Image (spheres, rainbow, N blue to C red):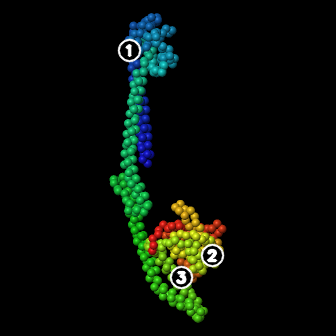
Amino acid sequence: MRVRLVVTFVVVALISAVTATALAYRDARTAVLQRTQNAAVNDLRERVTAVAADFDVPPDQQSLSRFAARVSDGLGGNIVVARYQDLSAVSDSLADTRARITTELRTAVMTGDGAQFQRVRWRDDPYLVVGTPVTFADGDRRTSGLEVFAITDLRAERDDTTALLDSVRTGMVPVVVLAAVLALLAAGTVLRPVRKLGRATRELAAGDLGSRVAVSGHDELADLARTFNETADALQASDTELRAQEAKARRFVADVSHELRTPLAAMTMVATVLEEDADQLPPDAARAARTVGAETARLSRLVEDLMEISRFDAKAVRLNAAEVDLADTVRASLALRGWTDRVRTELPEGLRAVVDRRRIDVIVANLVGNALRHGAPPVTVTLATAPGADGEWVTLEVADHGPGLPPGTGERVFDRFYKADAARTRGAADDTGQGSGLGTAIALENARLHGGTIEAADGPRGGAVFTLRLPLRPTREDTE
């Protein structure tokens, strides 16, 4: 912006200076030439009138030469040519006048009744040639046949106008320099508040909602700064209100989840007793007892998930990291839930990483449980390593052969309470122990806690593929 402004100022100043120089040169040159030719015409007319009073017509060569010399003496030594029919006399016998007195000018003088002039160039020098016919002094003003031409040197006028052009051209340099200086000053005055506003905007975009700009003056930039400050105030107020509401919502969820744990513990104990004695109850009562037990267990898991999410929101979770064998960890997680026979595994031995074993178990349980519930067999779990920009990474891929992810749900599957199948309703808990819509969100939070991530995509042969990527060394090694 500064460069464009300076260039614009300089170009405008240069164009203005060139235009002014051209106009000044044209007017000065015209004025000088006009004054010179007017003086030459008047002087020739007056001198010819004075000398012709004693001149007899028709002349001979000698009298014609004297006539030309007398006229030249009165004109300051300018070359004078006198012509009468076939006779011609030049005041300076060594002067070459043929190339300077053109046929057009002789014809104009011969056919006209007054003085005529023409500017010519001879040997690259400018000259003014003035011609006039000599008339009788009687009343009819008849021409005598005598024609007089005076050649005036214009080199002095040319030098004057050239010197004027050079001086004006030299004066353009300080004009352009002054324009550049003024442009820099103007750019500093105009662009300084723009730069401050841009810096404040970047700070605001980076999350500094307290960023403001100083307002000075009453111009458009000051109005823009005031508008920015008002917008930032409104944004900060909205952010504060949203943060307060979000904090209240988190506290509410945490408090509700905590308060539900005590009655849920009693309900779970009662439901367990009823399920153990269900075989001794009538069929309807037995079915109701098993349903109560399943839904109570489902509610207990939902409360635990809510409390886990609230701990992530409150930044109250820490890694309890240790070096473990990842293949053993995955196999133990599958065996704990009875999935060993339902899942194909490709787990290389000896792949060790520093992770929180309990949180890796949660991730595996959620991803594999999601594949068993929504996908189709076979479900495959593959463990491998992959190079990264900042070291070696480990990948855990969980793939199924079901219908895959609905279009546009690749990112939303990690949203809380998101259901890929909108028509799906909550029923009794299945053997995966999930169904709250929080499983993938909790898995992603645990992956991020390790400095990793989880990606969801459709497999090359159909089905959904969830890929866990973790660094072999966590970015956070704080212990709980």
Residue 253 found in image quarter: bottom left
For the residue labelled by badge 3, is the local secondary structure a helix, a strand or a loop? helix
Q: Is residue 411 left or right of residue 138?
A: right
Quick one: which residue is furthest to the front in this view? 350
> Pointer 2: what residue?
343
> Pointer 3: what residue?
298
Nearer to us in this view, 70 or 51: 70
Instruction: Give the residue type that dot 1 points to.
Output: Gly
Instruction: Give the residue type that dot 2 points to.
Output: Val
- Rendered location of residue 82, percent (x, y): 45, 11
User: What number is the disc on residue 76?
Assistant: 1
Q: Residue at x 44, y 82 (%)?
A: 259
Mark 2 and mark 3: Cα distance apart in space: 23 Å
Quick one: which residue is furthest to the left in this view? 217
Asked whether the beta carbons under mark 3 and mark 1 sit within 8 Å of each other, the answer is: no
For the residue labelled by badge 1, is the local secondary structure a helix, a strand or a loop? loop
Mark before the other along the chain sequence, 3 or 1: 1
Q: Between tags 3 and 1, which lies in front? A: 3
Mark 1 and mark 2: Cα distance apart in space: 123 Å
